[in-house]
Every structure is written in C-alpha cells, then in structure tokens.
Image (cartoon, helix red, strand yellow):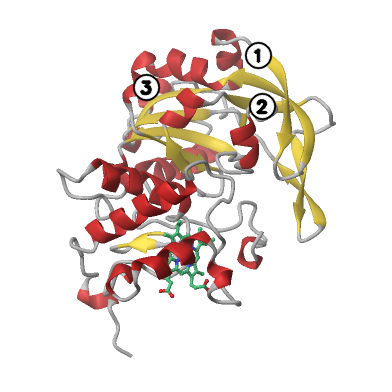
Amino acid sequence: MAPWQKTGSPHGPRIRLAGLSALLSGVVVFVVVGVVVGVVVGADVGARSAATSSRSPDPTRLSFLLRGEVQSVRVLDELEKIVVPSKLRVFEPYEEGPAEFRVLPFNAVLDAVYGAGWREQEEVLLTCADGYQPAFPVRRLLDHKAWLAFDRVDGPEFSILKLESGKRRRVDLSPYYLIWDNYNDAELRRQGDYGWPYQLIGIDLIRASDRFPKMTPAPGASSQVLAGFTSFRVHCTRCHAINGEGGSIGPELNVPRNPVEYRDPSWLRQWIADPSSLLASARMPALNKHLVDRDRVIDDILAYLGAISQQKVQPPAATRGDS
Ligand code: HEC
C-alpha cells in the first residue's frame, strides 16, 4: 500500500469527477429532506414513485439507477423477500483475514430490480455514503460471483477492523458492502480490495462514455484501443485524469502533453510495470503483478494513450492559470 492511500477517510484515494452524477446530489437531497421532514422527496431524480412511504427513511435504503435515473429504491426487508439470504465466508481484503457475512446474491438482486437486461449494460457505478464512486465493468459480475452483504456473522457489529499502516481501525460497513466469493476464485483473491466498496447506498448501470465522455476514444477505435480504455479505467483513472476527467492523485495524462509524446514506448512500458525501477521515489504503484496477460494489458493501455493523444480537449481558459 502506498502512503497516499492512508488517508483518514474511509476509502483512501478519492475520485472527484467533475459533476458527480445525479445520484449523489439526488441522494443528498434525499437523505437531508428525508431526515428533516420525514418524507422522501427526491423528485429531481425521478424517485417519487419508488418512495411514497410516509415513514421516516429506512437506513437500509438502496437506490438502483440506470444511466443516472433512479429506477427503484429498496430497503433490506424488501430485498430479503425477493432473493434468499445466506451466509458467505470470504477473505476480507481490508482486514486481511477470514470473515463471514450475511449476504444476498448480487446478480439475483439486479435481475429482480432491473430484469435480465442489466447484463447488456457496460459499467457498474457504485455510490458510497461519503461520495466515493468506484466503478467496474459489468463483465466482472458475469465472470465472478458478487454478494451484497448486510450483516456480519462472526462479530457483533456490521464492521471490520481495517488494517492501515499496521494499525487497526474499526470501519462501519452499513448499509451494504459489496463482497466477492474470493475463497473459490484465485483471480479475485489476487485483486485484493478492488471492487469491494462499503457503506454502499447506490448502484447505477452506465455507459462508460456517459461517465467519461472526454476520456472515451472516438467512434471507430480499434479493439485494442477499446481494451486499453477498459484497462485504463480499471487500473489508472482513480489517480489520473485524461482531458480533465478522472482522479487527481497523479498528473493529468493528456493535456497539454500526453506521455506518449515525450517518453519512448519502452520507457513507458517499464514505468507502468514498475515505476520504482525508474524512479526510486515514485509514488505510483506498479500495475497489479498478478494480472494474467500483464504485458498485453500494458500494450493495450499504451495503444489507448496513443489514440487519446489525438483527441485533446483543452481545459476552459478560466481554469488554466499561468502563474
Ligand atoms: C495510486 C495512484 C496511481 C495509479 C493507480 C496510477 N498512477 Fe501513474 N502516476 C501516479 C503518480 C503519483 C505519478 C507522478 C510520479 C510519481 O510520483 O510516481 C504518476 C505518473 C505517471 C506517468 C508519468 C510518468 C512520467 O514521468 O512521465 C504516467 C505515464 C503514468 N503515471 C501512467 C499510469 C498508468 C498508465 C496507470 C494505470 C496502469 C497509472 N499511471 C496508475 C499515480 C498513480
């Protein structure tokens, strides 16, 4: 783990995207108005029909969106009626040890809420209570088994003792924690905490181009460039922006100059594979060493960077700043 990941906030590095999706503002309005008035409003995100209850808001509420529009809001009681709860033992990646949770099968929940068509969507965008918004390709749910945890079995509370710089900090997981059956899936086990968001309050099915329009390759891009775009989203955007979209822990990688314009390909390959082999003080972590086809993933990412270097979007003059 790298030093900048040891922040006091529950999720470590934050991805602050320009214009956080309608969900977050919707949910904030939702929670605030709901708590104060005791009536759920959320009309600006089209949730009125899904939330006609006059009871005070149930803290187990989970919002289901499709491309930014709320389709449904369900509470745990309702979810437990549509899918069968069970227990699952996993290797808990933040605690770094075994843990057992009470869970609902995630794909079955999505089937019940969206119908089978959710499988045709591109990307799952999750929203956590603090605004953290991780995403992963829908494909991951088809290749691996995910579960929606709502309680812990082997402990008194729905929480974990997260290991941070050798110390343990108790982190509340409620209302939901997305977990994966990593005891029976070696690839998942190797991926650590990627795709394990806690304090989950919203699920949105989106197209990558909706979320990252300026980062998306132009229509007609080769399959290698598209594969590289997917890999870039999985491995790089939490720290790097392209055309101003993405994380800000590392440098923007397209404007004014894309590294493919000033670094040679072999240098870039080695940098992505192992930054500290080129710069002892590098803060950037090496690309996941356990990836299958790691060299191909790097080539794809370079193909993507090459393509996007032809599609520069200059930031607005007002924010450019010459000082
Ligand atoms: C955890 C944050 C993080 C992740 C993830 C990350 N980077 Fe970086 N990257 C950085 C930081 C920070 C720097 C600035 C140099 C340094 O301190 O390491 C950097 C620098 C770079 C540079 C500039 C190197 C130079 O000197 O020209 C490139 C290119 C780059 N990253 C590509 C990538 C790619 C491609 C990925 C995904 C495979 C990636 N980064 C993932 C944090 C990250």
Front-lying residue, 36 or 141 = 141
Q: Are marks 2 and 1 in contact (CB under 8 Å)?
A: yes
Q: Residues within 10 Å of mark 1 (few under 14, many from 20)?
A: some
Q: Secondary structure at mark 2?
A: strand
Q: Residue furthest bottom?
A: 323
* Residue with the mark numbered 1: 85
Image coordinates of residue 128 in percent, x first then y, are: 54, 43
Of the residues shown, which amino acid type is indicated by label 3? Trp
Of the residues shown, which amino acid type is indicated by label 2? Phe
Q: Measure how far apart labels 3 and 1 are at the Cα level.
A: 21 Å
Q: Are marks 3 and 2 in contact (CB under 8 Å)?
A: no
Image coordinates of residue 57 in percent, x first then y, are: 56, 29
* Residue with the mark numbered 3: 118
Q: Are marks 3 and 1 in contact (CB under 8 Å)?
A: no
Q: Secondary structure at mark 1?
A: loop
Placement of 246 over or under 170, stated as above or below: below
Q: Residue at x 49, y 45 (%)?
A: 134
Image coordinates of residue 82 in percent, x first then y, are: 54, 9
The mark found on residue 150 in the picture is 2
Q: Residue at x 41, y 47 (%)?
A: 296
Q: Is residue 282 visible?
A: yes
Front-lying residue, 60 or 168 = 168
In the image, which is nearer the foreground, mark 3 or mark 1? 3
Q: Measure how far apart labels 3 and 2 are at the Cα level.
A: 22 Å
Q: Measure how far apart labels 2 and 1 are at the Cα level.
A: 10 Å
Of the residues shown, which amino acid type is indicated by label 1? Pro
